[in-house]
Image (spheres, rainbow, N blue to C red):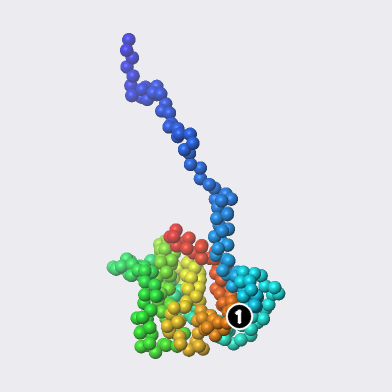
Amino acid sequence: MTALTSPTTRAIVAPPVRARRGRPGRTRERLPWGSPVVYFVALVVIALMLAPVLYIIIGGFRSNAQITVDPAGWPDPWNIENYLTVLTGPQFWRQVLNSTIAAVATTAGAVVLGLMASYVIARYRFRGRGALYAVFASGLMFPITVAITPLYIVIRDLGLMNSLGGIILPQIAFALPMTIIILVPFLRAIPDEIQEAAFIDGCGRLSFFWRMVLPLSIPGVITVGILAFIGSWNSYLLPLFILNNEAAYTLPLGVQAFSSQYSVDTAKVLAFTSLSMLPALAFFSLFERRIVGGLTGAVKG
C-alpha cells in the first residue's frame, strides 16, 4: 500500500541538511587587537615618530663639542645655556607673538565663515546646493603649493606684503574646505523637529542658530578650530613668499633664519628648533581626543 505524503509531511520527515564543515587546517584565526604583535608594531611606529623629536630636544642640552665627538650620545654634562640663550632673546618671543596672532586670526576666520557657510548648505534647500558643496570640497584637491604664484600676485596687488594680513587671509581661504566638510554633517544631523519647535516658540533663524545650532555643533567647531590653528602655526611656504621683513617672521621662518645665522652652533639651533615646535606639539596633545571625537561625529553624520 503506497502512502501519499503531502508537502508538509515530506518537509517534516525530510532528513536534516548537514552543515558544511570546513577543511581542517584552513580556518583563519584573526589576531585580537590586544595581541603582543599589535602592541609591538604600535611601539615600533611610535618610536620611529618620536625618535627625531627626542633627538632634537636632547641635542639642545649638549654642546657643539659633544655633538661632534658623539652625535648620538647623551649630554654629559647637561647644558641649559642654549635654551636660556634662546628664551632670553627678543627674537624668539617676537616670532611666537606673530605666529600666535596669525594662528588665532586664521582659526577665528575659518570657524566663523565655515560655520555660516555650512549652516546654509546643511539646513537650507535651494538650487545648486550640491554644486556649491562640491566647489568647497574640490578645494581639498588644490594645496597652497599649487596656488602660491597667483596668491603672491594678488597679495602684492592688495598691498599686504610683509604683513600678517597677507598670510591670514589665504590661510582662512584654504582652511574653509576642510572646515565645511567636517561641519556640514554635524549641522545636517540636527533633527528638523527641533527647528520646528523653536520656530513655534517664536525663535527666529538667527536666534535658532546661536541658541541651538552652535551648542549642538561644538565638537565639530572645536575640531576644525584645532586643525586650523595647527595648520597656521606650522605654515612655512606662504610666509616664506609673503614675509620679507624679519620683524614679521613667524616661527617656521624664524627657525630658518636662526639656522642660517648660527649655522656653526648646532646645539643652539637644536634648542631653538625644539622650543619652536613644543607649543604646537603640546596643543595637539591636549586636544587630541577632541579632534578624534569631532572627526568621528562628522563621519557618522
User: Residue shown at 42%/83% (left/top)?
Assistant: 241
Quadrant of the snapshot with the C terminus: bottom left
> Quick one: 220 or 270, which is closer to the camera?
270
> Quick one: 69 or 13, which is closer to the camera?
69
User: Residue shown at 51%/42% (left/top)?
Assistant: 29
Can I make out residue 82 in this image? yes
Residue 144 pos. (x, y %):
40, 75
Residue 67, placed above or below residue 19: below
Q: Is residue 297 left or right of residue 68?
A: left
Q: Quadrant of residue 16?
A: top left
Quadrant of the snapshot with the N terminus: top left
**Amino acid bearing label 1:** Lys
User: Residue shown at 57%/83% (left/top)?
Assistant: 262
| Disc 1 secondary structure class | helix
Q: Residue furthest right?
A: 77
Residue 76 pos. (x, y %):
70, 73
Q: Which residue is mark 1?
A: 268
Residue 209, placed above or below residue 158: above
Label 1 Cα neighbours within 10 Å, binned few <14 / some 14-19 / many ≥20: many
Residue 53 pos. (x, y %):
57, 70
Q: Quadrant of residue 176?
A: bottom left
